[in-house]
Image: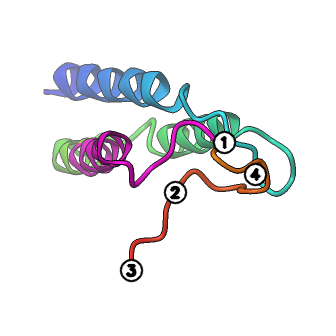
């Protein structure tokens, strides 16, 4: 179980990296969102790197996969912009009212 959980975590991490490479917006500090998101994802994975409880590992992977799927769905439906429309817009996410 530990190896399959690790394998799923690595697969999720790679999928996250593939998805966030399309975020070319810059944040308020001038950094590209893909760099910010990549560092954030890496930090999350590092925090849970030595988790040994199989239930917790499965839970973490499922939550991560769900979040990734929501971002990918948002990219397809237009709720998440991959390309900046407005140079002053610092966030790739559209507010949903």
Image quadrant of residue 88?
bottom right
Q: Are marks 1 and 3 in contact (CB under 8 Å)?
A: no
Instruction: For marks 3 and 2, give the one nearer the viewer.
Output: 3
Q: Image check: 45 left or right of 75?
A: right
Sequence-first tag of 2 and 1: 1
Q: Position of residue 19 (x, y in %)?
A: 43, 29
- Secondary element type, mark 2: loop
Q: Are marks 4 and 1 in contact (CB under 8 Å)?
A: yes
Distance, label 3 to label 4, CA atoms, is: 22 Å
Q: Are marks 2 and 1 in contact (CB under 8 Å)?
A: no
Distance, label 1 to label 3, CA atoms, is: 23 Å
Q: Is residue 68 above or below residue 21?
A: below
Q: Are marks 2 and 4 in contact (CB under 8 Å)?
A: no
Judge the density around disc 1: few (<14), some (14-19), many (≥20) Cα neighbours within 10 Å. many
Main SS of the magenta part reads helix
- Secondary element type, mark 4: loop
Q: Is residue 38 above or below residue 11?
A: below
Sequence-first tag of 2 and 4: 4
Q: Residue at label 4?
A: 27
Image quadrant of residue 89?
bottom right
């Amino acid at each position: 179980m530990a190896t399959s959980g690790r394998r799923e975590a690595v697969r999720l991490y790679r999928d996250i990296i593939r998805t966030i490479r399309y975020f070319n917006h810059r944040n308020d500090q001038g950094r590209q969102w893909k760099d910010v998101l990549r560092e954030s994802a890496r930090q999350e994975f590092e925090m849970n790197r030595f988790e040994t409880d199989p239930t917790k590992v499965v839970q973490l992977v499922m939550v991560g996969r769900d979040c990734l799927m929501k971002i990918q769905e948002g990219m397809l439906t237009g709720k998440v912009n991959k390309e900046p429309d407005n140079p002053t817009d610092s966030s790739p996410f559209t507010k949903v009212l």
